[in-house]
Amino acid sequence: MMGQINVVRICQEYIADNGSFSIITCILNIKPIPIAIADDAISRAIDTFVKCVALEMPRGLLINSINPKVLEEAWDIYGEMMPCFNPVPGALVGKAFERSVEGFITGQVIFVDAY
């Protein structure tokens, strides 16, 4: 958690005016599973950080978090732990990052879900 927060905190002075930060979290903060309570708490903290710090970002900087379900490309590894989820394609997560970086939104959690 602090790694992602510190990247934003430290890099603010190096990023170009009107630049964008996109932080990755995970779906477990809104759809928790018993074996990943720490992941749930960390994702909640990062998403809350993004919502709050967006109000204080200098020089037109934007910040959002991307919150996907487990990736199709990682399903072989994580699918067994998350049988009640449908995986999302990495390309869809990439589109969420594109929206965050090239858009105008800030302080948002961009959910990437495949029902």
Image: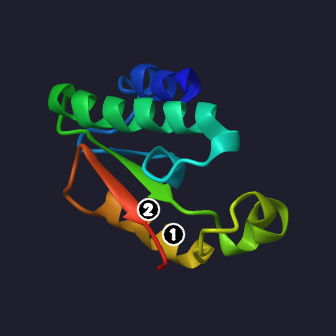
For label 1, the crowd category at 10 Å Cα-Cα, with few meaning under 14, some 14 to 19 and many 20 or more, is few
- Image label count: 2
Q: How is the image coloured?
A: rainbow
Q: Which mark is residue 64?
A: none
Q: Which residue is mark 2?
A: 97
Outermost residue, right direction?
Answer: 76
Could you say where residue 65 lies in the image, as x and y percent from the top left? Answer: 40, 47
Name the residue at 44% across, 62% down.
Answer: 97
The answer to whether residue 26 is seen in the rendering is no
* Residue 19, image x, y percentages: 31, 44
Name the image quarter holding residue 76: bottom right
Residue closer to the observer: 72 or 94: 72
Amino acid type for the residue under numbered disc 1: Gly
Q: Is residue 105 among what the camera can see?
A: yes
In terms of image quadrants, where is residue 49?
top left
The CA span between labels 2 and 1 is 5 Å
* SS assignment at label 2: helix
Residue displayed at 75% across by 57% down: 81
Residue 3, position in %: x, y? 58, 25
Q: Are marks 2 and 1 in contact (CB under 8 Å)?
A: yes
Label 1, secondary structure: give it: helix
Is 24 positioned to the left or the right of 98 in the image?
right
Which picture quadrant has residue 55? top left
Above-or-below relation of 73 to 20: below
Q: Against 83, is 48 above or below?
A: above
Q: Amino acid at mark 2?
A: Phe
Q: Residue at x 80, y 64 (%)?
A: 80
The crowding category of the residue bearing disc 2, from other C-alpha atoms within 10 Å (few below 14, some 14 to 19, many at least 20), is: many
Q: Residue under circle 1?
A: 94
Q: Nearer the viewer, residue 41 or 105?
A: 41
Q: Position of residue 112 (x, y in %)?
A: 44, 67
